[in-house]
Image (cartoon, rainbow, N blue to C red):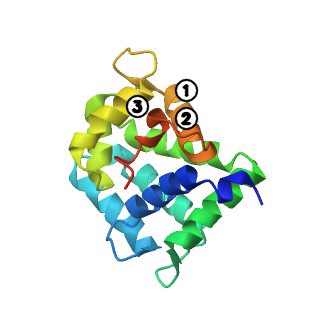
Amino acid sequence: MSELRTNAFYLKKLYRAAQVTDADKDGVVTRADYDLMIKRYNELGMPEENKQELSDAMYGMCGSLGLTDHTKSLTYDEIVQSWIDNVEKGVGFATIVYDKIFRIVDTDRNGSISLKEWEIHCMAINIPVEHAEPSFKAMDTDGDGVISHDEFVAYHYEYFHTSEDKLHSSLLYGPLQ
């Protein structure tokens, strides 16, 4: 068993991510949660030309978790263990997911994420907007006021792949609870 499966800080980060993924807050993650996130993105102004890519990316993430239809669900424990399994396999799954999420958030397709785009992302996944700026600043490691693809992937990698207990790596989905 890897250290990740027993590290309290690491597990706290993953359970926080599972709570965020449970968009309707019913205690399990289902395809309906992804439907709700897609709906929120669209209501918050997802450009028409990006809507199909948004749906494809979100449903691709569903498929990777085995949520292939509306009858399947995952408890927080199951989704956390699935994420750890993928990290331990190290087959590049995470980078593909991070690339998809980056493209979802970078709505103007300029290759970087602005604070406004990050705030919209936070609202779409039901993170209070006041938590957007601290996580944005943590990701913007060069301080240029935007999040590059490399910064985004590096931060997500740190969040989901490392167990070091430091504030920087705990801000992605708002305060750990």
Element marked by disc 3: loop
State the CA–CA distance, disc 1 to disc 2.
Answer: 5 Å
In-image side of 114 versus 11 (left or right): left
Residue 95 is drawn in which quadrant?
top right
Please state, as top left, top right, bottom left or bottom right, where the N terminus lies in the image: bottom right
- The crowd level at tag 2 (other Cα within 10 Å; few <14, some 14-19, many 20+) is many
Q: Which residue is mark 3?
A: 109
Q: Which residue is mark 2?
A: 153
- In the current view of this chain or complex, which residue is farthest to the bottom? 71
Q: Kindly indicate whether the residue at mark 2 contacts the one at mark 1 (C-beta within 8 angstroms).
A: yes
**Amino acid on which the number 2 mark rests in the picture:** Val
State the CA–CA distance, disc 3 to disc 2.
Answer: 16 Å
**Amino acid on which the number 3 mark rests in the picture:** Arg
- The crowd level at tag 1 (other Cα within 10 Å; few <14, some 14-19, many 20+) is some
State the CA–CA distance, disc 3 to disc 1.
Answer: 15 Å
Residue sitting nearer the eye, 108 or 126 = 126
Q: Residue at x 46, y 40 (%)?
A: 103
Element marked by disc 2: helix
Q: Of marks 3 and 1, which one's residue comes earlier in the chain? A: 3
Residue sitting nearer the eye, 11 or 88 = 11
**Amino acid on which the number 1 mark rests in the picture:** Asp
Q: Which residue is mark 1?
A: 150
Q: Where's residue 147, x and y in %?
A: 42, 26
In-image side of 23 versus 100 (left or right): left
- The crowd level at tag 3 (other Cα within 10 Å; few <14, some 14-19, many 20+) is few
The answer to whether residue 119 is visible is: yes
Q: Kindly indicate whether the residue at mark 1 contacts the one at mark 3 (C-beta within 8 angstroms).
A: no
Q: Nearer the viewer, mark 3 or mark 1?
A: 1
